[in-house]
Amino acid sequence: MAGRRVALVTGSAAGIGRAAAWQFAEAGYDVMVNYSRSQAEAEETADGVRSRGTDVRVVRADAGADEEVRGLVASTRDAFGRLDALVNNAATTRFIAHRDLDALTEEVWDSILQLNVKGLFYACRAAMPLLQESRGAIVNVASVAGIAGSGSSIPYAASKGAVITMTKSLARAFAPEVRVNAVAPGPVQTRWLADHQDMIEQAMTLTPLQRPASPDDIAEAILYLADRATLTTGQILVIDGGRTM
């Protein structure tokens, strides 16, 4: 297939998604930037891709809506003619104490599972034909919450546990053409946790490396799994400073 390789990063207006978009650009990929609400920040991400010397498009799409995700993948195909790496980064959560079961309404469950689980599946399904053609890769952004049952809320932990399982299922189903892996970050210093520094401080007391991850820490692992780990599939790379070892 002609042309530069192409990466689609969902939820890439800021945080891990933005860092991943920029690292793919540094590795020579053209990039499809996706956002749902933060257009100005998505354009800043795109400017960063351009400054690194590759092409970029910005598309608004709700990553939890099947038809919009199909449109996002179609826009990627129309713009670049190919897709080599899909990064499922878009996600949501609610900060709800795990003992507060009554706060876990149907609306809370539905909003988290719709984006974090169903939307991730929709993106994988829509992108799979292009990825099979390029023999590309998927990297899902899970969380150590999905391993340890910890994190911002029970539905969030459950959703990330589902991401881990889905990663393994898709890796088995689509080998050898498409590799499917996931990263599982611990606390990451992004705006998600800006108002919850107490959670970061508590986690650091049990973390051998004694610092939270930066978005770049996670993006480096995403690029590694997508671009360099060519004999790796169905794996979950934990990036939490050693907390869960």
Image (cartoon, helix red, strand yellow):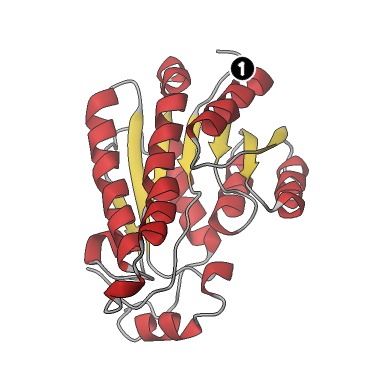
Residue at image point 34% right, 20% down: 177
Residue 229 lies in what quarter of the image?
A: top left
* Dot 1: element: loop
Of the 4 image quadrants, the one containing the C terminus is: bottom left
Q: Position of residue 213 (x, y in %)?
A: 46, 68
Label 1 amino acid? Gly
Residue at image point 59% right, 39% down: 27
**Residue position marked by numbered label 1 in the rendering:** 81
Q: Position of residue 214 (x, y in %)?
A: 52, 66
Within 10 Å of disc 1 (Cα), the crowding (few <14, some 14-19, many 20+) is: some
Residue at image point 53% right, 25% down: 83
79 lies above or below 161: above
Taking depth in this image into account, of 164 and 155 the one nearest to the observer is 155
Taking depth in this image into account, of 219 and 149 the one nearest to the observer is 149
Q: Position of residue 221 (x, y in %)?
A: 43, 51
64 lies above or below 205: above
Residue 198 lies in what quarter of the image?
A: bottom left
Taking depth in this image into account, of 222 and 197 the one nearest to the observer is 197
